Amino acid sequence: MKIVLVGINSKYIHTCLAVWYLKASLRNTGETVVREFTINDNKDGILAEIYKEKPDVLAFSCYIWNYEIVKLLIREIRKLIPECFIILGGPEVSYTAAAVIKENDPVDFVLCGEGEEVFPVLTEAIQNGSEEYKMLKGIAYRENGEIIYREGFNLIPQLDRLNSPYTDALLESAENRIIYYESSRGCPFNCSYCISSTFNGVRFFSFERVKTELERLLKFGPKLIKFVDRTFNCNKKRAREILEYIISLECGTVFHFEAAADLFDEDMLELLGRAPHGRIQLEIGLQTTNTGTLAEIDRVTDLGRLKSNVGRILSNSNIHVHLDLIAGLPFEDIISFRGSFNDVYGMKPHQLQLGFLKMLKGARVRNEAEKHGYSYRDFAPYEILENKYIKYQDILVLKDVEETVERYYNSGRFQKSLLLLEKIYSGDYFELYRALSVYCRKNAYLDRPIAYRENIAILSGFVKAELAGRVDMEEFRQAMVFDFLSSDSSCAIPDSIRADRDFLPAGRIHEMLRSEDFIKEHLPDFLYTPAKNILKKVFFVSLDLIANSQEILIFDYTQKDAVNGKYKNIIIKG
């Protein structure tokens, strides 16, 4: 018997850990093949690749981003391979298993929850022609034209019982992609919008197993290992063990964690402060700073401590910090959201993700939709349209704000330019991005992808059109030049911000580079390097309004900061 496990990811750089866990769980059921695709792949191409595998059993891991594609594919597969057993699992089908079978004729089985123990039972029963699967909980199937649903949600109580999914096949297929890793399952919190709140408790892999698996992963030299633990630091002792191990490593891999910043104590903050520069990324979900909203969604957060801890972590400059907000939560209208946005933006994280509430199957907020007057999309990802507190027209405003934040703030390429604009808005950062988004919408810039250099021209145009007289235009232009040279090693300054006054005479540059003392003081890594070779790696510019009234800046394109992505700059007195 041939089993084909299919993961359809949202992006090429992602991997589907679930199907590899299922493969590792199988026993004596013949050949097992994992195939991974993306939602951007041609559907006919995916169909052809699955067909060529000629599966006897075909299983899909279903999520909000791929479910619509899965439903289309299984209809065609049923026509082409009518004898194939089709099995669906994953969070998108686990909470409505019977309805999924009823609405999708090609589906034979739906498994609810974690599948590593029930999937082998089902596939062995299919292979042997037995009905042992009928004893399972958390399964839906067809029998004599009827849909049978045996209620339940499968969880693995002892995670160390699971076979490791990190085989050579997985690691080789994940080259130049994100490696996802879990050291625990579950979440200690009960946030009403999250399906992790549908079952209680957190289960952990042993530290010994985590260490062994990470050692194996590191042999393949991944650029990024992303822990998928819902709240990595919910167990302080265990989180510390893992972090101490990661901090002790000699490697170039970056480790990403989702954490609750208000749970960090002094010992943990001190440990994070010792992490190698760029080794760790933290994603911290604030979601809102509206205390009434936090109470309604059962999200326990000490906002004061969270802000203090985030500030402490950022002040060390060694860890990339990503903060999350969710629009559309109960009791949060656009005025309240504006306050939450300004609070979070004011912490100055490296990235601020503005997301929109998704009414996930199984989540309490979906089951209580009438309570808050929620209207949401009928198709995945079930995103909010409006509720009692925020209307669709306001959601559209926030969508445009989200896009401008993504293009300008989250790109990390406009830091100094934005600082000048933020001063004008006196802490109302939301209004800055609302005004910028209105300008972009009016000029049709939000209706298409925009390249980096065009975004520079757009921001410059916005300042000239909307903020004339409130901004020192020359200072702003120089800030834009500084941002560009800090982020782009081409040195080809865009015409929209370029000025002849910025460039030093070639003779003066060569004079400096011929001075051994100058090189020793400012560019020691280039000592005894010919000037023509130095100029391939560095760029000289004069920005007197930006460089603290100094005359010369040198950008060194051999050194890029691992946390903020900026190239090194050196200020030289004129």
Image (cartoon, rainbow, N blue to C red):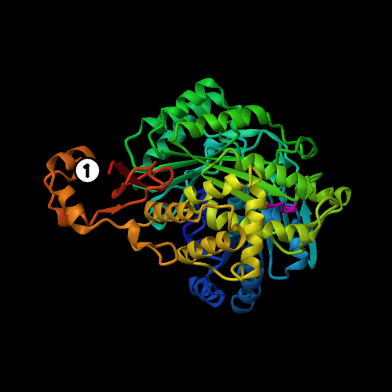
For residue 173, side relative to residue 408 (left or right): left
Q: What percent of the width, then of the height, locates residue 289?
A: 71, 38
As drawn, which residue projects farthest toward the top?
267
Viewer-nearest residue: 51 or 380: 380
| Magenta stretch encompasses residue 518 | no
Q: Quadrant of the C terminus?
A: top left
Please say if 264 is above or below 510.
above
Determine crowd level at label 1: few under 14, some 14-19, many 20+ residues with C-alpha closer than 10 A.
Answer: some
Q: Is residue 534 visible?
A: no
Q: Which residue is mark 1?
A: 523
370 left or right of 336 in image = right
- What's under tag 1, amino acid-wise? Leu
User: Majority secondary structure of the magenta segment?
Assistant: loop
x 38%, y 34%: residue: 276
Q: Which residue corresponds to the image point at 34% horizontal and 47% vertical from the top-left? A: 221
* Magenta residues, start to end: 356-361
Q: Secondary structure at mark 1?
A: loop
Could you say where residue 83 lies in the image, as x and y percent from the top left?
62, 72
Q: Residue at x 72, y 61 (%)?
A: 396
The residue nearer to you, when weighing 230 against 168, is 230
Q: Position of residue 353 (x, y in %)?
A: 60, 49
- Percent position (x, y) of residue 71? 67, 68
**Residue 527 sits in which quadrant?**
top left
358 within the magenta span: yes
